[in-house]
Image (spheres, coloured by chain):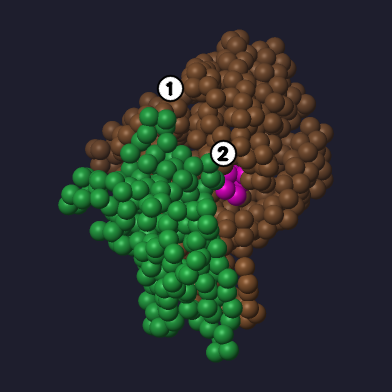
Chain colours: A green, B brown
């Protein structure tokens, strides 16, 4: 199968002090089934390996002669494209959003000792595609999370579930 | 601020015992024992517990602290009050003691008010909220009892002779009345009843109630029986109320209420065991080990409590030393060991959150375990345990040299704790996160 490669070069973003996460994750989310992602960065982007691995990608990489890194992310054959993995659901009316479907990324942070739920949710928030909603399931109401989300420009609403767990809906302001 | 002040008081208290070991090797109704006891209770235990409650209660009960400003004001009253009280106990100046005691008590009023307003916001009442409320009530009564005992020891004649303003006269008459009422009771009994209000009513109640929230959280488990949790707190309240009255009146019913308290702790231990058996995290870290060892020490403490509550027990040198041992094991064994254990869970989190929460998802941040040394934790655990054993033996044998050696071990335990806290706080000055913009490797990698 001939795979088309989508290239995302984040060297200027990083050198300019800009956050490259959203750009990378938006590109990954937009990939078609026969497409792969080439990421060019000024260093080996190890944190992205873990994030994209969870989204069903494998990677190969090498350092170039200039010292930059080129990493090729390819979807594992058994996984669906990310867009398909993201549920299409109505926006939560409490967020005041207009009608229409929104992407939902679900994070299960149950069964983790504090502060791991906080870390897991905030790492997922950093990689949240624009316009998407993150739904985080936790054993306890995430009291330390709200101020962090607010500081990063996100709003959150938490609901207690019938089984005693908590579901937090997170969206950009 | 609260934690650091508490640690300083703990170090000062242990150092005091090393320098003056006869405090524990002789009978406890003297100014030095009372001074060092208040240094441990108010300076160390109360300070750390109050600081932890400002942080924990809102999180554990899913609400917000009513006022941080009140907490800062309370800290000032608290420090001035307890330092002055300890000093005045040492020089045995009852009038100045009452003044500093009033400053301390005003701080406690601010603390209780702040906590009560915070508790009013709790969206879902549970056993932890009930225990915290009970602890606040017992703390208020302990402070009232302590001030009343001090009022009974004061002389008001000289103040009256200076023709003070009318409101001062009214206040002095009130204090005289309180003092006259307390004078009806045996001073030793009043002191013991006051000590139980604080030690059992406030601190043990908090250990029980807060651990119902924290132990399941840290061991990845759940409460196993809400009925058991309710019984443990209810029995503790009933047993303490009965113990206070029977101790104060030297009643033959003392053992009955001591047994009710022991039954409460047994139900608590039963539930704790069930929580631990259901845990998903099999390995227990040092913080939890410290805490559980403290809970195990409730066994010998309970036996001592029942023995000492026996009405026919003669008061001689040996039983006097057993009373010293009871106080020592309760404050330095159970309560301090439990606090150190919980501190190893709480302080790293507060430092980590304060220093690294803004970097999560933006940089690689250290884990909680990276903030402290497990070796120092182990060293602190074993030296503290050795110190407890050696000092306990020395107290029973009335050996000042033995107390000095035992407290030397305790001092090593404090040093290990202080070093570890220093390592944690160092992250504020030298953070260990790695920004994503730094290269992590220079060699090509193929996955």
**Rendered image quadrant of residue A65:** bottom right
Same chain letter for marks 1 and 2: yes
- Whether the residues at callouts 1 and 2 have beta carbons within 8 Å, the answer is no
Q: Pointer 2 indicates a residue of which chain?
A: B
Q: Position of residue B413 (x, y in %)?
A: 71, 51
Q: Nearer the viewer, mark 1 or mark 2?
A: 2
- Residue A38, compared with residue B315, is above or below; it is below
* Segment colored magenta: B339-345
**Residue B65 to residue B302: above or below:** below
Is B343 colored magenta in this rendering?
yes
| Circle 2 residues within 10 Å: few <14, some 14–19, many ≥20 | many
Q: Quadrant of the C terminus of chain A?
A: bottom left
Q: How many marks?
A: 2
Residue B258 in sight from this viewpoint: no
- Spatial separation of the CA atoms under disc 1 and disc 2: 51 Å
Q: State the SS at label 2.
A: loop
Tell me the residue that label 1 is attached to: B181
Q: At 70% across and 21% down in the image, what residue appears?
A: B303
Nearer to the camera, B156 or B293 = B293
- Which label's residue is closer to the chain start, 1 or 2? 1
x and y, in percent, of residue B430 in the image = 55, 72
Q: For residue B118, which quarter of the picture?
A: top left
The chain holding disc 1 is: B
Q: Is residue B258 left or right of residue A160?
A: right
Image vertical order of residue A23 relative to residue B304, above or below? below
Q: Residues within 10 Å of mark 1 (few under 14, many from 20)?
A: some
Horizontal and vertical percent position of residue A68: 53, 83
For disc 2, the marked residue is B220
């Amino acid at each position: 199968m001939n795979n088309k490669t989508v290239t995302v070069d984040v060297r200027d973003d990083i050198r300019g002090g800009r956050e490259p996460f959203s750009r990378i994750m938006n590109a990954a989310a937009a990939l078609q089934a026969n497409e792969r992602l080439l990421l060019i960065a000024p260093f080996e982007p190890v944190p992205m390996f873990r994030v994209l691995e969870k989204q069903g990608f494998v990677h190969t990489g090498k350092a170039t002669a200039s010292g930059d890194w080129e990493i090729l992310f390819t979807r594992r054959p058994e996984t669906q494209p990310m867009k398909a993995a993201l549920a299409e659901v109505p926006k939560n009316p409490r967020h005041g959003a207009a009608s229409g479907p929104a992407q939902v990324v679900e994070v299960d942070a149950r069964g983790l000792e504090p502060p791991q739920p906080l870390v897991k949710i905030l790492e997922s928030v950093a990689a949240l595609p624009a316009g998407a909603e993150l739904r985080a399931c936790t054993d306890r109401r995430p009291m330390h999370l709200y101020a962090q989300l607010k500081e990063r420009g996100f709003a959150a609403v938490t609901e207690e579930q019938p089984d005693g767990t908590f579901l937090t809906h997170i969206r950009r302001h | 601020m609260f934690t650091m002040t508490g640690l300083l008081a703990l170090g000062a208290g242990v150092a005091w015992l090393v320098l003056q070991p006869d405090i524990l090797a002789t009978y406890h109704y003297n100014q030095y024992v009372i001074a060092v006891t208040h240094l441990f209770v108010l300076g160390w235990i109360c300070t750390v517990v109050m600081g932890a409650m400002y942080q924990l209660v809102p999180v554990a009960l899913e609400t917000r602290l009513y006022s941080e400003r009140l907490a800062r004001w309370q800290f000032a009253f608290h420090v001035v009050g307890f330092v002055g009280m300890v000093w005045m106990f040492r020089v045995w100046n009852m009038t100045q003691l009452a003044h500093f005691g009033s400053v301390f008590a005003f701080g406690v009023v601010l603390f209780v008010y702040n906590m009560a307003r915070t508790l009013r916001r709790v969206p879902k009442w549970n056993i932890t909220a009930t225990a915290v409320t009970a602890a606040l009530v017992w703390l208020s009564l302990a402070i009232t009892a302590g001030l009343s005992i001090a009022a009974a020891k004061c002389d008001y004649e000289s103040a009256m002779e200076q023709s003070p303003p009318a409101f001062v006269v009214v206040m002095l008459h009130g204090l005289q009345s309180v003092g006259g009422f307390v004078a009806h009771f045996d001073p030793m009994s009043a002191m013991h009843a006051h000590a139980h209000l604080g030690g059992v009513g406030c601190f043990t109640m908090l250990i029980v109630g807060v651990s119902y929230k924290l132990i399941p959280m840290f061991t990845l488990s759940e409460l196993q029986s809400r009925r058991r949790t309710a019984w443990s707190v209810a029995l503790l309240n009933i047993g303490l109320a009965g113990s206070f009255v029977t101790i104060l009146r030297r009643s033959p019913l003392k053992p009955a209420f001591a047994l009710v308290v022991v039954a409460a702790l047994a139900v608590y231990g039963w539930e704790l065991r069930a929580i631990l058996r259901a845990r998903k995290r099999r390995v227990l870290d040092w913080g939890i080990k410290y805490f559980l060892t403290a809970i195990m020490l409730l066994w010998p403490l309970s036996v001592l409590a029942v023995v000492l509550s026996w009405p026919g027990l003669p008061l001689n040198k040996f039983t006097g030393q057993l009373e010293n041992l009871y106080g020592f094991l309760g404050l330095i064994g159970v309560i301090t060991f439990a606090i150190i254990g919980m501190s190893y869970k709480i302080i790293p989190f507060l430092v980590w959150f304060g220093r690294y929460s803004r970097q999560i998802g933006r940089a690689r941040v250290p884990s909680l375990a990276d903030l402290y040394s497990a070796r120092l934790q182990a060293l602190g655990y074993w030296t503290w345990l050795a110190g407890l054993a050696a000092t306990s033996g020395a107290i029973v044998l009335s050996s000042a040299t033995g107390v000095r050696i035992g407290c030397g071990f305790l001092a090593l335990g404090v040093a290990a704790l202080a070093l570890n806290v220093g390592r944690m706080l160092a992250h504020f000055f030298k953070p260990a996160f790695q920004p994503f913009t730094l290269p992590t490797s220079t060699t090509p990698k193929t996955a």
